[in-house]
Amino acid sequence: MTGAEPKVTQELALAHGLTAEEYDRIIRRLGREPSFTELGLFSALWSEHCAYKHSRVFLRGLPTQAPHVLQGPGENAGIVDLGGDLALAFKIESHNHPSFIEPFQGAATGVGGILRDIFTMGARPIAILDSLRFGDPEDAKTRRLIDGVVAGISWYGNCFGVPNLGGEVGFGPEYAGNPLVNAMAVGLVRKDRILRARAEGPGNPVLYVGAKTGRDGIHGATMASATFDEGAEERRPTVQVGDPFTEKLLLEACLEAMQTGAVVGIQDMGAAGLACACSEMPARAGTGMEVELSRVPQREPGMTPYEIMLSESQERMLLVAARGREAEIRRVFAKWELDAVEIGTVTDDGMLRARMHGEVVAEVPVKALADEAPVYEKPTARPGWQDAIEAFDPLALAAGSDPERALLALVGSPTVASKEWVYRQYDQQVGINTLVLPGSDAGVLRIKGTPKAVAVTTDGNARFTYLDPRRGAAMAVAEAARNLAASGARPLGLTDCLNFGSPERPEILWQFKEAVAGIAEACRALEIPVVGGNVSFYNETLGQAILPTPVIGMAGVIEDAECRCTQWFKEPGDRVALLGPDAVSLGGSEYLWTLHRILAGQLAALDLRIERAVQDACRAAIEARLVSSAHDCSEGGLAVALAEACVSGPEAIGAEIDLPGSARPELALFGEGPSRIVVSVPADASRALEALMGEFAVPWRWIGVVGGHGLVVRMGGAGAVSLPVTQIAQEWRAGFERHVS
């Protein structure tokens, strides 16, 4: 061991984010005190971000298998079978803490990292999406965060050359000190060219490929495993710096090298950098690895073994080559002007052995780093305030708010209003495969050479999860699947990004446990496997936790791309139908928050059998070409869904709607509930739709007709809403930008 490193003490271990018990466990496992570099390895690999110490016990209950799942959780990305020769790889990850500290680079490197997770599997990225949460947009600091995050996402994705197909943006005061930046990527791969992050074959050489290593990002994983305090912005050195042009070269070089057959395994150097790749790859394969750190390409002088192992510099991969074929790989990377340096060898002794100029600086069993982090079963407790917020009855508020004023306020609210200000900064059509641009229920891409298309979406409702974690998380799964169904797609798999506060607080861990149970319940009922995901804990600042925010990324297939559907009304004279039940609630609704600033109440009932039947019926109607448009009812309820269907298309068009009379029109108009889709149907297809709905035995009813220059809603024959679509469109299109500019 080198004598140049600091002596390791318990105090130093605590400063690295380890607990005293964890430090003792490390000493017992090694039979000695760790070296400074070894302490760095354990602090990173045993961090919450890498080891899932508090979440693993709950995640085991998620359904992860199905006949079409080719790769489930445990790899860089999940993969599902698309039929024929092709498969779809997809994954979602968080970059929350880095994006608060340095919004532009934090968001940019979040995109870069998720793209590498995709092409590490041998897949070419075809789309990215993002799910964002911020504090009050009226606050100047929040506006700076929004500007920086959106700019970072667009810069990296646009320069790399991958279309951004949308996502979501939400707001809440709980995110003021801890925004959420969740990035999802999707890629296509031939089934016979899937690669995995495994260091197979003792004697095979280990190559470092990509950009050089610097001091940026050191302790990024550890930083992401702690709550923030007043000095959070001072942690900028732990945020990586991205280079999308180098990443584009790395993509092409990796895919070309993979096609030679000389690549045995490959892993992105993401969280915990070289330390993670050098331990996880051999741990998966039951092998070991020996590396010489002085051979690692470095862009800064005098880097120590500790810094080299823990750097999270971007655009780097660790690759295991077939012995004797190293020269082929070096030639490929030289063509793309990238480093490809042999830094080590796969061994058969199960150890990670790192040397610096021949001197051993770390010698640790790979299983100890990758598989033996403690798994905690900490106490959970239902929050004491849960009963009170559930007991609140929104209908106890005074009745009589003007429905027209309420509708305009909702369509202009930052959560509901058009996000064109965001997505117009993204390249949406690079690759010329985009069939449905951002702004509908899901983005849709053609699969060249086939009649098929892929639909993708991200969804999450933190208010629902706060009020009822189990049902709220299940509703997020249902909404994502419903958005795909409304686009004509059959869901193939789910990737989740679970954003919560500190798991060391029993009430936060209870929220997490219940949310995971809700996701599992919905996935089983809808037969959608979970193929990967990410847990992001410690999202709180100065004791203020974010709302529990499970974000669901979902991908599905449209067998005939010509049968894709969008959310906006198309033709005057089309009849409008509402598929699904009438049960709705103002609890947790956008109406209750926007007009009254109240987050309380009970959620509407969720019947997953009805949910599945409605989705199946909608998809069947689209495949039979019986509907012109289909739009999920979500934030803002039926009235907002109708307004969006009127104004979100290329040209605004009105509709006349007749609903039953109600003593509380705000409930019928703005109440929110699952399993509801608004469809428009050509008049000559009405009878066929009626017959199809009868076959599926779903609740549904005709509610109106498309046409005119206004949205007119009558309730029990009396006028409730009569607004020009131009006025609605103006509020909807200007609402978001008005709040953030």
Image (tube, helix red, strand yellow):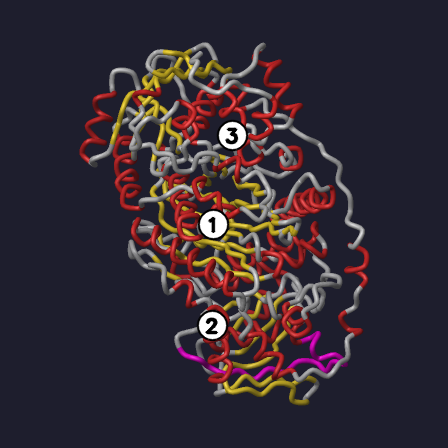
Towards the viewer: 687 or 285: 285
The residue depicted at 18 percent of the width and 34 percent of the height is: 335
The residue depicted at 54 percent of the width and 78 percent of the height is: 575
Q: Residues within 10 Å of mark 1 (few under 14, many from 20)?
A: many
Residue holding disc 1 = 99
- Please report whichever mark, 2 or 1, sits nearer to the chain's N-terminal start: 1
Query: In the shown orientation, is residue 658 left or right of residue 140?
Result: right
Q: Which portion, as a residue range, is magenta?
A: 651-668
Q: Please tell me the numbered disc located at residue 568.
A: 2
Provide residue 686's location: percent of width, then percent of height.
54, 75
Q: Residues within 10 Å of mark 3 (few under 14, many from 20)?
A: many
Q: Please tell me the numbered disc located at residue 44.
A: 3
Query: In the shown orientation, is residue 625 left or right of residue 380?
Result: left
Label 2 is placed on what type of residue? Trp
Q: Is residue 722 visible?
A: yes
Q: Is residue 191 visible?
A: no
